[in-house]
Amino acid sequence: MGKKLISMTVNGQTHEVAVEPRQLLIHTLREELGLTGSHIGCETSHCGACTVDFNGESVKSCTLLAVQADGADILTVEGLANDGVLHPVQEGFTEKHGLQCGFCTPGMMIRAYRLLQENPNPSEEEIRTGISGNLCRCTGYQNIVRAVQYAAEKLSAE
Amino acid sequence: MATPAEEIKDPVDGIGCSRKRKEDARFIQGKGNYTDDLKLPGTVFGAFVRSPIAHGRVVSINKEPALAHPGVLAVLTAEDLAPLSLHWMPTLAGDKQMVLADGKVCFQQQEVAFVIAEDRYVAADAIELVEVEYEELPVIIDGRRAMDDDAPVIRDDLEGQTEGAHGERIHANHIFRWDVGDAEATDKAFDTAPITVSEDISYQRVHPCPLETCGCVSNFDKISGELTVYLTSQAPHVVRTVVSMLSGIAESKVHVIAPDIGGGFGNKVGVYPGYVCAIVGSIVLGRPVKWIESRVENLAATAFARDYHMHGEIAADENGRIQALRVNVLADHGAFDACADPSKFPAGLFSIVTGSYDIPSAFARVDGVYSNKAPGGVAYRCSFRVTEASYLIERMMDVLAHKLGVDPAEIRSRNFIKAEQFPYTSCLGWEYDSGDYHTAMNQALEAVDYEGLRKEQAEKRANGDLMGIGVAFFTEIVGAGPTKNCDILGIGMIDSCEIRVHPTGSVIARLGTKSQGQGHETTYAQIIATELGIPSDDIQIEEGDTATAPYGLGTYGSRSTPVGGAAAARAARKVKDKARKIAAAMMEVSPADLDWDTDRFIVKGLPDQSRTIKEIAMAAYQHLPEGLEQGLEAVEYYDPPNFTYPFGAYLCVVDIDRYTGEVKIRRFYALDDCGTRINPMIIEGQVHGGLTEALAIALGQELSFDEDGNILSASFMDYFLPTAVETPHWETDFTVTPSPHHPIGAKGVGESPNVGGVSAISNAVIDAFAHKGVTHLQMPHTAYSVWKTINELGINQ
Ligand code: FES
Ligand code: FES
């Protein structure tokens, strides 16, 4: 199948990649760019393990073709920390035990990162609704909520 | 509200500390190393052609069109595997299972052919090109119909075999009959008891559904003859043994590596056809073959759990003191008996069914049958068949309470095994190690103001509102297990730990278990830290690589802490024994003259004469007096003398919308006693997660099928996984009753919340209708099924 050249910015770096028109964005990220932090849990837009930040929105990258990302600005878990300093969301997840197996964690954190920009001071209910597109099988969400609250406090103090 | 966060200050961050997790650093930075992340040069991809029907003969398979497709390297069928005797494989339960359809298919989505291609998209294209012709046969979906006279025979390969792996087979679709207890004494008690109750209680077919599906990468080195398989396994050493047995490759040349695992919950214990096909593919092609399950495949084909149809009966006196328990179970095992139980226990540890109660006689019978559904029967976040058993007795306690008009909490207290009765031998033969049930129950009732809740419920009922209070008490049996009765494929269910102390005092420890999110890298280090006086941060834990870790049976059935954790403590004690000898030599005293204090040996009566473990470590690699060998390390293979018996008291309050049937968990309080608590933060996390899985099972999860055997719940559209919105706030609490036989008194906790949680939530939903005479409703309590009950009872009129 003929490949198409696309260009996208991922974690601040511009990449030119030749992709099959049918290739899913998650596969391009994981297999062409080697960014395996974003995961695949369902391929049907339900679990959110593949969530990336896409032009300022949380997007499930298993449900987007790579060609649709031509020109896009994407942030994945690998780009959350800044010069080796953890992002408050990352800090919150480890401080509050917001992860167990870690499989949902990259998608969950990328979602939390955007949620806190949409709503810097969310209530518990708003956090729960805000992350409801991301499934976690391990934590029961309680400590994820606390992790997001931790990050919210830390970010608003910055 | 009791959400304890005890903080212990400890110089080495050992047992009892809520130490932050060591493994988090890689996961929060996207640097986890899961199976699908692996990219070996030259990797090719495998995908299955699967059966669209639940039962039928395979008339023909034409793989030519697929083979002609560009990028396709091979198409394997049973015919190709037969010369290697790999078209079937043995199961852990003493049965065998088709790797690829051998003449017929017995469940929808069964593996029929394996296509290997240069890329995963090409493999997906090519499976559509394999032409398979089927001749449909009638199906059995409800296991309760499997032994009807006119039931179609599912396993033609067993025709005429009246003996199975566990004794007599009484029907072509019968697998085993397992009886336990004293039938005569039990019947006698029922004949004379003033009160008897009975109920049909089913535990629906569910799936553990970890967020990461199963998969592997197999790499065969033609030159060295070595096979390396990376796979999502909770039990990598067992997989190595199975692979060696199946392939004929010497076990020393088989290298199984379980990298990071995205949740297991029992789904990743067994050996699946995908592993076998990827291994054969890599041997044939000389290239690494990757096979990663899709979510549909995961839900439809690998490792279901439960599917137990139970009939429970209790005989009691007028005061509700139980005299006997009788249980009959029809266990639907699917098309092949691939249960992951210790070999001699075809119904797992179901005989824990007498629960937390002092019951004089009991009898249980379990009949396993085949049906046209996927094989499995794994312990989904529980010890083998313990959730089923616990659910049965906890439902029956409510049924008895209802009959007598006694409060459910009170009926339990009247029947509890008393603290002074431990160690307690149940009438079905288990020796419960320790417990204090009354204390736990009372603490729970007080914490939630149980009396107040019952008052509120009475008022609500007067207004026509539906409020339910679920009481559940559970006793688990975990940590399989003593080699005298527990083995898998003939290998005793030991686990192991090897500890090496380096000259500068840091440590590497390797274990035979395998974390799937439980935090072993953190908690095992805490055990060793306390034993050796070395800071946790200086202790590196490794698991999952069979080339380096000592042999162990893996992580499931809450066995990591009871068995692996015990091995860690005892290996550390061996190290410490040697350290004592070295310290004695260093200070020229006898080893018996030394006392241990936190991180050093001190000469008795001379507190300034001491050597720290760090100093001893260095000395261990220097000149030593005769009779002492250099090095400071030890290996322990631990054979537990008994199981451990964690327990807990759970209370759940639900409000039910009487127009929509929606169940809302208003409050859930969980008191767990897992003995010594290694890391309270991790324990609480385990409880939150287990309760959320319990909620899923009680209120929504079910692998359901239509009458033709089509699976109706093979995606997240149809299989319920709770989001943060449906999940309530969990309250956790604890008591501590150490296990007397475990080196540090710990019992294991990961699975307790699922065992107790399902009963508590289901009991709460049913309790909401108790005043209308309802004694039982089948799970899952979805809004629709609850609404149907409401409608039948006319509550919404
Ligand atoms: S993999 Fe994209 S939502 Fe599940
Ligand atoms: S931590 Fe395992 S799925 Fe969320």
Image (cartoon, coloured by chain):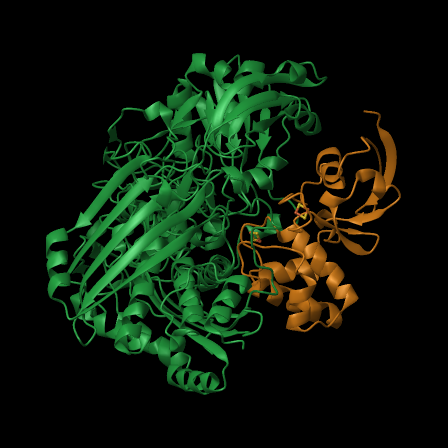
Chain colours: A orange, B green
Q: Which of the 4 image quadrants contains residue A125?
A: bottom right
Give whichever of B371, B512 is nearer the camera: B371
In the image: residue B508, left or right of residue B490 = right
Give whichever of B690, B514 is nearer the camera: B690
Give whichever of B454, B461 is nearer the camera: B461
Residue B259: tell me if it is visible.
no
Q: Which of the 4 image quadrants contains residue B199?
A: bottom left
Q: Which of the 4 image quadrants contains residue A154?
A: bottom right
Count the numbered circles shown. 0
Q: Is residue B312 above or below residue B640?
A: below
Q: Is residue B343 above or below residue B563?
A: above
Residue B282 placed where, x, y %? 55, 20
Residue B472 placed where, x, y %? 36, 68
Residue A140 placed where, x, y %? 54, 61
Give whichever of B189, A73 is nearer the camera: B189
Residue B238: tell me if it is visible.
yes
In the image: residue B330, left or right of residue B549 = left
**If the image is split into quadrants, where does the C terminus of chain B sit?**
bottom right
